[in-house]
Image (cartoon, grey):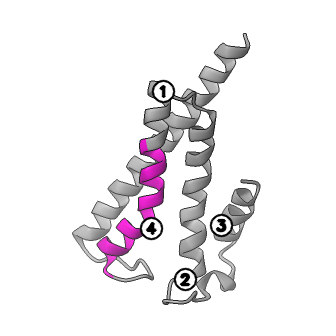
Amino acid sequence: MSWAPLALAALVSGSEWLGAELPGGLPLGNLLGASILFAPALAGWLAARPRARQRLWATMTLAAALAWLPVSMLLAGNVALNFHGERGAAWLGFSAVVVIALGVSLAWALVAGLRRRG
């Protein structure tokens, strides 16, 4: 998961190569954006104890992070994620829910880890 900060830095910098098309026409930047959501979701899942409510939450968060790119493409109607009208608002809401769920998952994992240690 050490690649996630590099991917984030590339997205923030707005590098031209982010627009490079992968097979199927998907811009590389969209794949990197999805990977930035996947990394913390996976970290939260790995940190959660099996058969705990935290693991269930982390599993749902991981599923939402994995679904982010396909759902985004469905809402946009294209692989470039160009939105129009209400679909853009729906995408923004969906993305916000995923990011908030990621934050909760990571915070929960941090608190649980601190409790186990101390």
Q: Is residue 70 above or below residue 47?
A: below
* Alpha-carbon span between mark 3 and mark 1: 37 Å
* Alpha-carbon span between mark 2 and mark 4: 12 Å
Q: Residue 61 colored magenta?
A: yes
Res 51 label: 1
- Residue designated by label 4: 69
Q: Secondary structure at mark 2?
A: loop
**Classed neighbour count for the residue bearing mark 4: other residues with Cα under 10 Å, few (<14), some (14–19), many (≥20):** many
> Which is more N-terminal, label 4 or label 2?
2
**Classed neighbour count for the residue bearing mark 2: other residues with Cα under 10 Å, few (<14), some (14–19), many (≥20):** some
Q: Residue at x 62, y 88 (%)?
A: 20
What is the span of residues highlighted in magenta in the rendered image?
Answer: 60-77
Q: Main secondary structure of the magenta part?
A: helix
- Residue designated by label 2: 27
Q: Nearer the viewer, mark 4 or mark 3?
A: 4
> Which is more N-terminal, label 4 or label 1?
1
Q: Residue 117 colored magenta?
A: no
Do the residues bearing badges 4 and 3 touch, measured as CB atoms within 8 Å?
Answer: no
Q: Nearer the viewer, mark 3 or mark 2?
A: 2
* Alpha-carbon span between mark 3 and mark 2: 15 Å
- Residue designated by label 3: 12
> Which is more N-terminal, label 2 or label 3?
3
The three-letter amino acid code for the residue at tag 1 is Arg
Q: Nearer the viewer, mark 3 or mark 1?
A: 1
> Which is more N-terminal, label 3 or label 4?
3
